[in-house]
Image (spheres, rainbow, N blue to C red):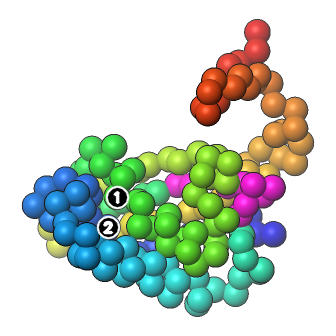
Amino acid sequence: MIKSLTLVFDELPPGPNGKEGVLRMYWTERNKLMHRWHMLVRAQLDTLDLPAMPLFDCTHPCTATATRVGTKLMDWDNFGASLKPVLDGLVKAGALEDDSPEVIRGLALHQARSRKGGRKPCLAITLTAVDALEGPNELATDRRRTVGVGDSRLSVDRP
């Protein structure tokens, strides 16, 4: 089992808003964009010597950290939404069993602004095994109580 996987892309996926945003795209154009990102993810995974897929699943969850370097900073909700083609590409390529909260336990977003003539825009995604962060028995001895509410779940710290 791997502890961590980092993929770096030399371009940025579009956000949902704006003239070229995903929400304004015609469905065929949006499908082409999704397919392109799926291929970019697959191309990077194919260059690595990885163990059997999926790398992360419900029994071996991970956390995801996304770092975006661009000429403009995005709102946090738009940045998270712009990761959809990348995360879907990881699922389609087989690196993730699913992009649900059972597999990706947490998502951290980081941004930096590049100056003209400085760093080129890029996106880095790091998947880190939960075992590598918390130790092997940390999940089994969680100090929080999980309460089911309909289909959603709330975690409450125990007193």
Q: Residue at x 68, y 48 (%)?
A: 102
The percent position of residue 21, horizontal first and vertical second, equals 20, 60
Residue type pointed to by label 1:
Ser
Badge 1 vs badge 2, beta-carbon distance below 8 Å: yes
- Residue pictured at 44% horizontal, 49% vertical: 109
Q: Is residue 27 magenta?
A: no
Distance from disc 1 to disc 2, alpha carbons, whole Å, reads 6 Å
Farthest left residue in view: 19
Point out the image quarter for the C terminus: top right
Q: Earlier in the sequence, mark 1 or mark 2?
A: 2
Residue 13 numbered mark, or none = 2
| Mark 1, secondary structure of its residue | helix
Tag 2: amino acid: Pro
- Position of 16 compared to 155: left or right? left
Mark 2 residue element? loop
- The correct choice, above or below, for 82 with respect to 150 in the image is below
Question: Furthest-top residue in view?
Answer: 159
Residue 68 position, x and y percent, is 36, 59
Task: Give the residue at x 77% y 80%.
Answer: 52
Q: Position of residue 93 (x, y in %)?
A: 58, 78
For image coordinates 24% across by 62% down, the residue present is 22
**Location of residue 95 (image quadrant):** bottom right
Please give the range of residues in magenta. 56-65
Mark 1 is surrounded, within 10 Å at the Cα level, by few (under 14), some (14 to 19) or many (20 or more) other residues, namely many
Asked if residue 49 can be seen in this view, the reply is: yes
Q: Looking at the figure, which quarter contains the N terminus?
A: bottom right
Q: How many marks?
A: 2
Query: Label 1 belongs to which residue?
Result: 82
Image quadrant in which you'd find residue 142: top right
Seen from the viewer's position, the closer of residues 79 and 151 is 151
Q: Main secondary structure of the magenta part?
A: loop
